[in-house]
Amino acid sequence: MRKLASAALLCALSVPAMAQANCGEVSITEMNWASNTVVTNVAKFIMEQGYGCDVKVVPSDTVPAVTSVAENGEPDIVTELWLNSAGEAYLRLEREGKIERLGKVLDPGGVEGWWIPTYLAEEHPELKTIEGVMANPELVGGRFNNCPDGWGCRIVSDNLIRALDLESSGIKVFNHGSGETLASSMASAVQNEEPWLGYYWGPTVPLGKYDMTRVKLGEYNKEIHEKNQNPDADNPGVSEFPAAPVLTSVTTDFKDREPEVTEMLSKMTFKTDTMSALLAWMDANNASGEEAAVYYLSNNRDEWSGWLNDDARKKLAAILEN
């Protein structure tokens, strides 16, 4: 039924609309992770079918995309740009007036933290805080599922473990060897309604598939969090993980050339929880990014219709009603 229902829209995705006079060729990145594939295909569909653009998708990654903008002035649109990964090179492009951020494509952004299953939080509300977890280590299985070695979150979590003196409470730290085993440990626990405590991030399939509750570590403190990113921090502290800014950015030339499309992109925002749910749907249905875009557009009209101008909204409504 899913395949049949999306066939017409998938056809529309592959056949661009007749270009309008005010929208020509547009280049947009497609990064090599699942959520970005969804973002790119949703944006591509809207630009082609609503605004008549001729869209070229450019496979890329964060650093190569920023480098290409610096050297070549393209691609026009960089989708799902994680600011904490783009670094100083991106900020320099902003200062030089070559690129401009339009807004957050994920709201509140990339999320990360320490989590427990929601059924555990509902049965034992005290576990919603790290103090409650440490006072009741047996309720979380006496184990913390840590990030694999080499991941940035491993450094931060290791420093939090030291600052909290977590193991003194009776909670043993298990350092996973890969992201796959970390995800599998969550899946196994939730499917069997067993205790689980560990680090995870979103948008991801597990956070879309399983109902999890983030443990409150305390208030976010920028200075402490930055210190905790240093593996050699001599005096780590306790700070909540902040939401990572995830942006849509365009070249300034594109903003001047395509103001209406730029306005639409500035409004294109997905709730992080919504994106995690989309990724879980993709995983369960072995779906492509194009199919996920169709699924999103077909089921979330109230969200995306506010991004578009009146003319584009009418065009997409006509396609989606067929």
Image (tube, grey):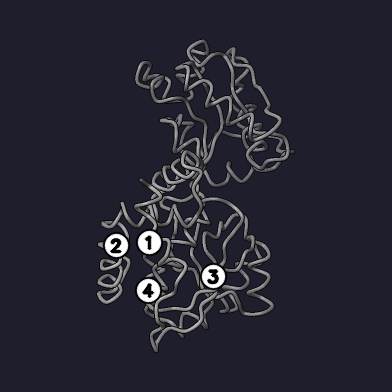
Q: Secondary structure at mark 1?
A: helix
- In three-dimensional space, the C-alpha distance between marks 3 and 2, rounded to whole angstroms, equals 23 Å
Expressed as whole percent of the image width and height from the top left, the position of residue 89 reads 66, 67
Circle 3 packing at 10 Å, graded few (<14), some (14-19), many (20+), is: many
Which residue type carries mark 1? Leu
Residue pictured at 45% horizontal, 54% vertical: 291
- In three-dimensional space, the C-alpha distance between marks 2 and 4, rounded to whole angstroms, equals 22 Å
Which residue type carries mark 4? Glu
**Taking 148 as reference, is 265 left or right?**
left
**Which numbered marker is on residue 263?**
4
Residue pictured at 51% horizontal, 73% vertical: 250
Residue 111 shows in this picture: no
Expressed as whole percent of the image width and height from the top left, the position of residue 93 reads 61, 73
Q: Earlier in the sequence, mark 3 or mark 2?
A: 3
- In three-dimensional space, the C-alpha distance between marks 1 and 3, rounded to whole angstroms, equals 20 Å
**Which numbered marker is on residue 9?**
1
Q: Earlier in the sequence, mark 1 or mark 3?
A: 1
The residue to which callout 2 is attached is 320
Expressed as whole percent of the image width and height from the top left, the position of residue 298 reads 32, 55
Q: Decide which of 274, 129 is in the foreground and name it.
A: 274
Residue pictured at 44% horizontal, 66% vertical: 13
**Which numbered marker is on residue 28?**
3
Expressed as whole percent of the image width and height from the top left, the position of residue 122 reads 35, 21
Q: Secondary structure at mark 3?
A: strand
Contact check, label 2 and label 1, Cβ < 8 Å: yes
